[in-house]
Image (cartoon, helix red, strand yellow):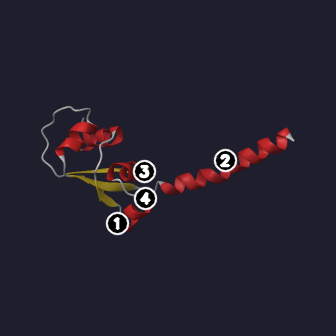
């Protein structure tokens, strides 16, 4: 019985892995028009950046910072405008805009 449950759990894990892989298909263009979102994403560091700023992030990060669902992002042509700050957004800003 224990082996049967273990086998079922393993099979469920294998079935769900491709679903997770399908969610991430490329990057999303995120436009940041609010300097406070940039500063909050960079741990309140003051930076000299002219807005708007565009960065590319995974779709899960984009959904989080834009405050919309993944399907909506897809319908909008894989682009959205940031409404929230996040550490992942800060990393994208740092590497793509500030080149650090």
| Neighbour tally class for label 3: few under 14, some 14-19, many 20 plus, Cα within 10 Å | some
4 or 3: tag closer to the N-terminus:
3
Alpha carbon distance from label 4 to label 1: 11 Å
| Neighbour tally class for label 1: few under 14, some 14-19, many 20 plus, Cα within 10 Å | few
Which residue sits at x=12%, y=38%?
Answer: 48
Residue 19 horizontal/vertical position (percent):
57, 55
The quadrant of the image that shows the N terminus is top right
3 or 2: tag closer to the N-terminus:
2
Q: Is residue 78 above or below residue 54?
A: below
As helix, strand or loop, the secondary structure at mark 1 comes to loop
Q: Which residue is mark 1?
A: 77
As helix, strand or loop, the secondary structure at mark 4 comes to helix
As helix, strand or loop, the secondary structure at mark 3 comes to helix
Q: Is residue 10 left or right of residue 22?
A: right
Tag of residue 53: none
Q: Which residue is mark 4?
A: 70
Alpha carbon distance from label 1 to label 3: 15 Å
Alpha carbon distance from label 1 to label 2: 31 Å
Examine the rendering and report whether any part of residue 2 can be seen.
Answer: yes
The quadrant of the image that shows the C terminus is top left
Alpha carbon distance from label 4 to label 3: 7 Å
As helix, strand or loop, the secondary structure at mark 2 comes to helix
1 or 2: tag closer to the N-terminus:
2
Residue 16 horizontal/vertical position (percent):
62, 52
């Amino acid at each position: 019985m224990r082996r049967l449950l273990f086998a079922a759990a393993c099979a469920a894990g294998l079935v769900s892995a491709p679903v997770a892989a399908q969610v991430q298909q490329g990057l999303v263009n995120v436009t940041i028009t609010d300097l406070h979102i940039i500063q909050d994403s960079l741990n309140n560091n003051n930076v000299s950046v002219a807005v708007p700023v565009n960065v590319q992030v995974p779709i899960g990060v984009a959904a989080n910072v834009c405050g919309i669902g993944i399907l909506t992002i897809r319908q909008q042509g894989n682009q959205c405008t940031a409404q929230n700050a996040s550490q992942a957004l800060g990393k994208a800003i740092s590497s793509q805009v500030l080149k650090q």
